[in-house]
C-alpha cells in the first residue's frame, strides 16, 4: 500500500510558477539565494522556538546549511538543520500562497519581462524560483520535535500538481534537491556555487558548508576534474552583516544585504548603520528604497523592520519600531536590552522600544536631510558666492532627494499629523510645485527666501491636479502681483496642512479660504476701490444672495479676481472644497 497523495497547486501558485519560470529566466541564479534564505529562516525559527523548548535541538545543536551536488545525476541539494516541516506544513507552505496581496500582484503584471521580474522580486516568490533551473524538485523534511516516522517527501515538476508521501527521516530539518534542467548544468560546479554564495549569502549569520574538492590524479578523467574529499568547509563569512564593523563592509555588501531583506531588485538610495548606546543599546541598519512598493498606500502595510535581540531573529515587520509615515524604510534592529521572548503586544508598551523608535525616526529624518542638502548642491553653489568643493560621495547623492520625494513624498507628509515632535523637521523636507517655478519643486524655505517685500503669509492652493491649481481663478490677483503660490495637489495635502499652520514664524494661508487679506501688499487705492465697489454693488449682492440662499453662505465683492467674473471660496475655518470632495469620495 502506498501513502502517496497527489495535490493540485492552488490556482495562483500554478499561475505564478508559469510566470517565474518564464520571466525570471534571464536571472536564473537567484534561486540559490532564495533557497538559502529559506534555510536560514528555518534555522532562525528553530532557534526562536527552542528558547522555550531546548529539546527541539535533539542531538544536532549545530544550525547550518549544506550545499552539495551530484554531477552524474545532475542534482543540486540544499540541506538545513532548521525547524523542518510536517506533512501538513509541506502541503500548505509549498502548495499555496498564504500571503495576501497575491491577487493584487497578479493584476499588476504587465507581460513585460523586466518589469514583471522586479515585481516578482518584490513579492519574494522564494521557493518557486527553484523551478527556473529545475524540472523536478524533491523536498524531504522532518519537523523538529516530531518522531523519525513523521518525515515527509514532497515532489513536483512545477506544473499543476505535487505529490506528498510520509517517509522516515532521521535528520531534523529540510533538504531540497533540484533536478537541474539541461541548460542549468553550470550550477554543478563548486567554483560557481561558491561565487554565488559569497555574492548573495555572505551575510547570512549561519555557516554555509560545501564539500572540499581536490585535483583528481590519473584515472581516465578529463583534466580539470575534481574529486570530493568528504571534508566540509564553511564558504561564507557567516557573521550577520550588521554586527561587523562598518569599515569592513563594502557598499556592494550593504546593497546585497538590502536586496535580501527587502526582496527589492534595485539598490537602495541610501543607508545608515550605527551602534547606538545610551538609555538603551542597539544596532541600527536602515535603508531608504529607491522606489515605492505597490502597497505603499496601505497604511496597515507591514513595516519593513526586522527585529533581532542579541542576534537572535525575533520578528519581521516590527511596526512598533518605526512610525507609520516612515513605513517605507527597510532594515534591521538588533537590541541588546529587550527580552528574547518579547511579543508584539509587549513591544507596544516597552520603554526600550519607544527609545529605539525615536532613535530610528531621528535617524531617518537626518538621512533625508542629508540627501536633500546634497541634491541642491548645484543650485546652492550657483546662487551663493562661495562654491564649495563637491566630494565624490556628495556627488553621488545628487538627484536622490528628488527621486525619494517623487516616490515617498506624499507618505512623508502624513508625518505632520502623526509626529508633532518632529513637525518642523518634516515641514522642512516637504517640496511643492509653485505658480511661478516652472516644474521645479519648492521648499517652504525657498519660498520664504523670495517672498515679496511686505508679504506676510505663505500662500497655497489645493486642487486635484497641478493644471487645475494653476488655472484656478483664485490665483488671478496673485499672478497679477507676481506673488508665488504653492500648488498642493497630493491627496493628503489638505489633511496634512490641517496640522501645519506656520513655517518658521510665517503663517500658511490658503488662497481659497475667506477674504484673502494681502495685507501690506495691497495698496490704499485698491482697498478704496474695493470698498467703493462693495457699496455700489450692495443691491446686486442682496439679489444674488437671495437667489442662491440655499447654495451659499454669503456673496461678496472681491479683489482676488482679475479676469474671471466670480469664484467660489470657503469660509475661513471651514472645510475646503477639496477636502469636502475627498471625504465625499471616501463615503463620509
Ligand atoms: P517566504 O520565504 O517568503 O515565506 P518562500 O516561497 O520562500 O516564501 O517559502 C514558502 C514557505 O515554505 C516558507 O514560508 C516556509 O514556511 C516554507 N519553507 C520553505 N523552505 C523551507 C525550509 N528550508 N525549511 C522550512 N520551511 C521552509
Ligand atoms: Mg523565502
Image: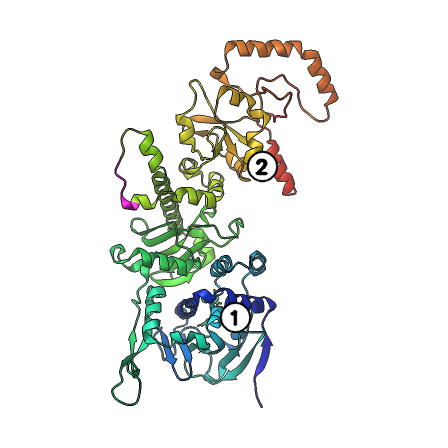
Residue plotted at (29% across, 57% down): 250
Determine whether 93 is above or below 245 in the image: below
Residue plotted at (41% across, 35% down): 428
Q: Position of residue 537 (x, y in %)?
A: 67, 12
Residue plotted at (27% across, 85% down): 216
Asked if disc 2 is less than 8 Å from ligand 1, the answer is no
Residue plotted at (43% across, 58% down): 265
- Say which mark, if any, is on residue 440: none
Give the position of the N terminus as an image quadrant: bottom right
Disc 2: which residue = 464
User: Residue 537 in magenta?
Assistant: no
Seen from the viewer's position, the closer of residues 125 and 284 is 125
Disc 1: which residue = 93
Q: What is the magenta range?
A: 388-393
Q: CA distance from mark 1 to mark 2?
A: 44 Å
Of all residues, the one furthest to the right in this rendering is: 547
Residue 248 seen in this snapshot: yes
Q: Position of residue 331 (x, y in %)?
A: 39, 55
| Mark closer to the chain start, 1 or 2 | 1
Seen from the viewer's position, the closer of residues 473 and 332 is 473
Asked if disc 1 is less than 8 Å from ligand 1, the answer is yes
User: Residue 391 in magenta?
Assistant: yes
Count the marks.
2
Seen from the viewer's position, the closer of residues 274 and 38 is 38
Disc 1 secondary structure class: helix
Residue 221 appears in which quarter of the rendering? bottom left
Residue 341 seen in this snapshot: no
Of circles 1 and 2, the one toward us is 2
Q: What predominant SS class does the magenta segment belong to?
A: loop
Disc 2 secondary structure class: loop
Amino acid at each position: 500500500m502506498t501513502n502517496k497523495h497527489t495535490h493540485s497547486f492552488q490556482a495562483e501558485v500554478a499561475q505564478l510558477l508559469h510566470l517565474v519560470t518564464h520571466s525570471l529566466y534571464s536571472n536564473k541564479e537567484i534561486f540559490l539565494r532564495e533557497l538559502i534564505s529559506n534555510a536560514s529562516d528555518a534555522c532562525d525559527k528553530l532557534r526562536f522556538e527552542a528558547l522555550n523548548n531546548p529539546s527541539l535541538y535533539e542531538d544536532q545543536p549545530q544550525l547550518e546549511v549544506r550545499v552539495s551536488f551530484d554531477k552524474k545525476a545532475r542534482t543540486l541539494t540544499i540541506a538545513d538543520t532548521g525547524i523542518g516541516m510536517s506533512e501538513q506544513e509541506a502541503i500548505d507552505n509549498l502548495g499555496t500562497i498564504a500571503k495576501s496581496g497575491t491577487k493584487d500582484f497578479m493584476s499588476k503584471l504587465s507581460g513585460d519581462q523586466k518589469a514583471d521580474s522586479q515585481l516578482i522580486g518584490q513579492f519574494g516568490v522564494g521557493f518557486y524560483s527553484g523551478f527556473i533551473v529545475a524540472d523536478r524538485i524533491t523536498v524531504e523534511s522532518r519537523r523538529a520535535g516530531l518522531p523519525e516516522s513523521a518525515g515527509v517527501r514532497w515532489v513536483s515538476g512545477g506544473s499543476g500538481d505535487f505529490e506528498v508521501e510520509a517517509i522516515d527521516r532521521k535528520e531534523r530539518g529540510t533538504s531540497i534537491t533540484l533536478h537541474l534542467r539541461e541548460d542549468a548544468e553550470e550550477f554543478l560546479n563548486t567554483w560557481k556555487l561558491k561565487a554565488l554564495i559569497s555574492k548573495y549569502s555572505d551575510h547570512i549569520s549561519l555557516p554555509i558548508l560545501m564539500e572540499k574538492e581536490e585535483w583528481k590524479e590519473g584515472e581516465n578523467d578529463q583534466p580539470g576534474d575534481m574529486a570530493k574529499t568528504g571534508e566540509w568547509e564553511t564558504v561564507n563569512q557567516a557573521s550577520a552583516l550588521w554586527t561587523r564593523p562598518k569599515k569592513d563592509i563594502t557598499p556592494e555588501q550593504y546593497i546585497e544585504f538590502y536586496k535580501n531583506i527587502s526582496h527589492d531588485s534595485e539598490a537602495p538610495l541610501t543607508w545608515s548603520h550605527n551602534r547606538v548606546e545610551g538609555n538603551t543599546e542597539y544596532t541600527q541598519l536602515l535603508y531608504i528604497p529607491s522606489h515605492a512598493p505597490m502597497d505603499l498606500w496601505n497604511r496597515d502595510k507591514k513595516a519593513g523592520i526586522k527585529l533581532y535581540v542579541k542576534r537572535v531573529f525575533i520578528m519581521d515587520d516590527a511596526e512598533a519600531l518605526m512610525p507609520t509615515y516612515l513605513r517605507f524604510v527597510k532594515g534591521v534592529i538588533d537590541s541588546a536590552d529587550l527580552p528574547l521572548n518579547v511579543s508584539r503586544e509587549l513591544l507596544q508598551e516597552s520603554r526600550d522600544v519607544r527609545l529605539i523608535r525615536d532613535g530610528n525616526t531621528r535617524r531617518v529624518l537626518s538621512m533625508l536631510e542629508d540627501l536633500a542638502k546634497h541634491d541642491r548642491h548645484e543650485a546652492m553653489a550657483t546662487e551663493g558666492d562661495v562654491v564649495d568643493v563637491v566630494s565624490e560621495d556628495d556627488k553621488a547623492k545628487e538627484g536622490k532627494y528628488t527621486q525619494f520625494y517623487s516616490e515617498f513624498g506624499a507618505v512623508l507628509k502624513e508625518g505632520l499629523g502623526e509626529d508633532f515632535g518632529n513637525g518642523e523637521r518634516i515641514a522642512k523636507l516637504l517640496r511643492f510645485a509653485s505658480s511661478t517655478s516652472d516644474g521645479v519643486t519648492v521648499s517652504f524655505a525657498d519660498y520664504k527666501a523670495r517672498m515679496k517685500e511686505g508679504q506676510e503669509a505663505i500662500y497655497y492652493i489645493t486642487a486635484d491636479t497641478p493644471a487645475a491649481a494653476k488655472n484656478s481663478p483664485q490665483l488671478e490677483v496673485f499672478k497679477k502681483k507676481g506673488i508665488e503660490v504653492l500648488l498642493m495637489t497630493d491627496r493628503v495635502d489638505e489633511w496634512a496642512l490641517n496640522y501645519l499652520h506656520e513655517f518658521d514664524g510665517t503663517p500658511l494661508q490658503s488662497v481659497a479660504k475667506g477674504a484673502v487679506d494681502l495685507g501690506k501688499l495691497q495698496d490704499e487705492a485698491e482697498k478704496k476701490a474695493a470698498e467703493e465697489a462693495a457699496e455700489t454693488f450692495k443691491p446686486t449682492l442682496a439679489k444674488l444672495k437671495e437667489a442662491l440662499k440655499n447654495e451659499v453662505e454669503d456673496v461678496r465683492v472681491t479683489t482676488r479676481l482679475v479676469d474671471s467674473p466670480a469664484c467660489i471660496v470657503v469660509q475661513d475655518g471651514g472645510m475646503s472644497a477639496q477636502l469636502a470632495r475627498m471625504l465625499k469620495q471616501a463615503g463620509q
